[in-house]
Image: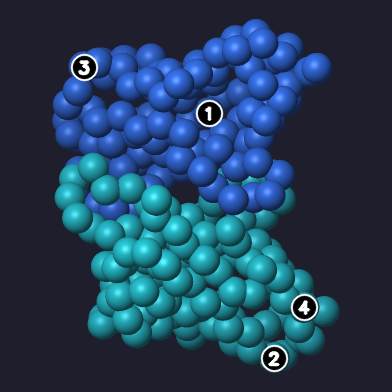
Amino acid sequence: GAVVSQHPSWVICKSGTSVKIECRSLDFQATTMFWYRQFPKQSLMLMATSNEGSKATYEQGVEKDKFLINHASLTLSTLTVTSAHPEDSSFYICSATAGRGEADTQYFGPGTRLTVL
Amino acid sequence: AQTVTQSQPEMSVQEAETVTLSCTYDTSESDYYLFWYKQPPSRQMILVIRQEAYKQQNATENRFSVNFQKAAKSFSLKISDSQLGDAAMYFCAYRSHNDYKLSFGAGTTVTVRA
């Protein structure tokens, strides 16, 4: 099956520092990757859509200068939280799709828990 | 973005019994896809079942089945013979035919009583 990994699974950082989260599709080429944010007991909120080799498309209200997304290859997308603050603490989830057809499905990574002190 | 509504924040079911989770959505499109995802305590999102809107037949996956009512814009999930491992948060999601983005409902937390 399609497997998506994320690294790290959890990270604690000091306020003002930057944190990078990696999302990899392990057994397929992901033409499109998505980044979500999830607060406890809430739904997933889409932050941005990332296509390989092009700039990410951010959802309304998401600061693109704060959440930098790079999709450098067909198997890797990164999310960098710049100058992190405690309010950025959250669970970040990526997903990937191979874009092979209409019935294509998003496969999700296991998530990264970010805590900003 | 399309609106997906899950009106049941929590549901409880006895082990081996059946539980039905409701989902309604709002769209003007005729061709789209609907999904149910499960998020257990590990928080790994797992695809439970998928339905293409152009298919009249309801999708089934082992103990999981859906009741897709296109005219009513309803997409409920039935879990039969509930097991302790079914305890999780369940999300209904909508995907347009022309866009890979998913719109999620608020989720329903399912508790299974032994």
Tell whether label 1 touches label 3 (CB within 8 Å): no
Q: Say what secondary structure mark 3 lies in.
A: loop
State the residue in front, A2 or A84.
A2
Q: Which mark is residue A24?
A: none
Tell me the CA gap for discs 3 and 1.
22 Å
Q: Chain of mark 2?
A: A
Q: Which mark is residue A12?
A: 4
Figure colour of chain A: cyan
Image coordinates for residue B113, horizontal then vertical, percent:
78, 18
Give the letter of the blue chain: B
Q: In the displayed structure, would residue B27 be above or below residue B96? A: above
Tell me the CA gap for discs 2 and 1.
38 Å
Q: Which residue is mark 1?
A: B6
Tag nearer the camera, 2 or 3: 3
Image coordinates for residue A44, horizontal then vertical, percent:
54, 51
On the rendered structure, is A31 left or right of A113?
left
Tag nearer the camera, 3 or 1: 3
Image coordinates for residue B56, horizontal then vertical, percent:
21, 17
- Please, which colouring scheme is shown? by chain
Q: Which residue is mark 3?
A: B56
Q: Chain of mark 3?
A: B
Q: Which residue is mark 2?
A: A17
State the residue in front, B59 or B2.
B59
Disc 1 crowd, CA 10 A, few/some/many (<14, 14-19, 20+):
many
User: Amino acid under label 2?
Assistant: Thr
Identify the residue at image location x=59%, y=74%.
A7
